[in-house]
Amino acid sequence: MQNSSSDATALPARHGARVRIDLPALAANYRTLAAAAGGAETAAAVKGDAYGIGIEPATRTLARAGCRTFFVALPKEGAIVRATAPEATVYVLSGLAPGAAPSLAAAGLRPVLGSMAEIEEWAAWKKAGGEGRAAIHVDTGMNRLGLTLAEAAVLAADPAAVDDLAPALVMSHLACADTPDHPLNALQAERFAALAARFPGRPASLANSAGIHLGAPFRFDLVRPGIALYGGRFGPGPALAPVATVTAPIVQVREVPGGETIGYGAAETLRRPTRAAILSIGYADGYPRAAGGADGRPGAFAFVEGHHVPLIGRVSMDLVAIDVTDVPSARRGVEVELFGPHVAVDAVAEAAGTIGYELLTRLGARLERVYAGGG
Ligand SMILES: *Cc1c(COP(=O)(O)O)cnc(C)c1O
């Protein structure tokens, strides 16, 4: 166990919420995905502070588990990966900002070139003597980043230009991989296979977490899971091991007469005399405000002393109320799980009208972080 917030040691006993990050579970999830990847290299998406769990410890853990290739959104994230895993290959998904080629290459980062403007700038810089590697991103149906199929076909028809560019990877991204029956999946795989064949000898990559499970035609040479590594749901099947567990202590327990309201806006009227436990966690910690309960709209559940109990009333900035009427052992100081092994992060996300990805990447800076298994 290692506690990263050592500057707080002079303060009295802990009072706030914490997130416990299970690094051995992250390593185990990596190995599970690598086994499912059917011979494709298993890379890792560590953007967004490794989906909120901490980019440095995540990178270190994944590199030790055998991961050699990392995807980040931004160069500054890439610099952290580079410093943490010096041998790793690091791709920057947001591509090439104007004028950024020399600094990216000097930092040992590979831009994922996603437009003809980026390709032209990178090619011109290489022609002028610049040395660096890059990926080419082709859009097959997402309409976000990437060359159009027509642009990619024109490029592929000029082998000398492709040789000058020497792309280390040709990639695309699935829009609906978490919905296996969506017709766009097969269409994207078909388009990408045809396109990749026009870049012979260049490794190809299409699948995110969910894409790995769509079958062999989606896996190509390299897969790029993110959410599955961190224990979030990535399709209709079960998630892998939870990595982040958020808990908060009960600050006080109060008896509230039936018929009274609880919390801001008096948004929830209690139908029975209720033992309400007030927890030291709120939206300032990244727990979503929309996960609260209000009249006629149930909120998320929490887990305390072996019981699943509902949130009651709105989530405040620093506090949350739960109904512990049926859990007599829930007392001041008792620790409550907000999500983790007993409450799926995706269940809380669903109650809040969002997805597990957003909850994880929004874990707040105020949360105490505890890394199990070294950090
Ligand atoms: C974020 C991202 C991934 C990882 O996606 P998950 O759904 O988290 O597995 C893979 N590829 C690209 C291009 C991404 O942006």
Image (cartoon, rainbow, N blue to C red):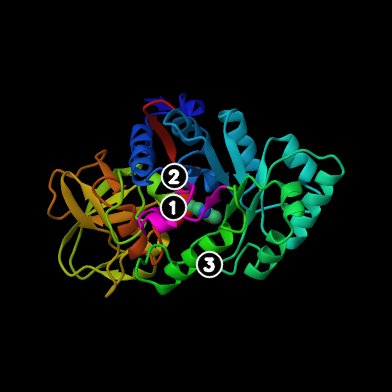
Neighbour tally class for label 2: few under 14, some 14-19, many 20 plus, Cα within 10 Å: some
The yes-or-no answer for disc 3 within 8 Å of ligand 1 is no
Which residue is denoted by mark 3 in the rendering?
191
Instruction: Identify residue for label 1.
Output: 219
Q: Residues within 10 Å of mark 3 (few under 14, many from 20)?
A: some
Label 3: element kind: helix
* Residue 10 in picture, x, y percent from top left: 47, 24
* Discs 1, 2 touching: Cβ within 8 Å: yes
Query: In the picture shown, does residue 61 fall above or below 47?
Result: above
Answer with left or right where residue 59 lies relative to residue 79. Answer: left
Residue placed furthest toward the right: 128
Q: Magenta stretch: residue 223 in it?
A: yes
In the figure, is residue 125 to the left or right of 7? right
Picture disc at residue 40: 2
Q: Position of residue 158 (x, y in %)?
A: 74, 58
Nearest to N terminus: mark 3 or mark 1: 3
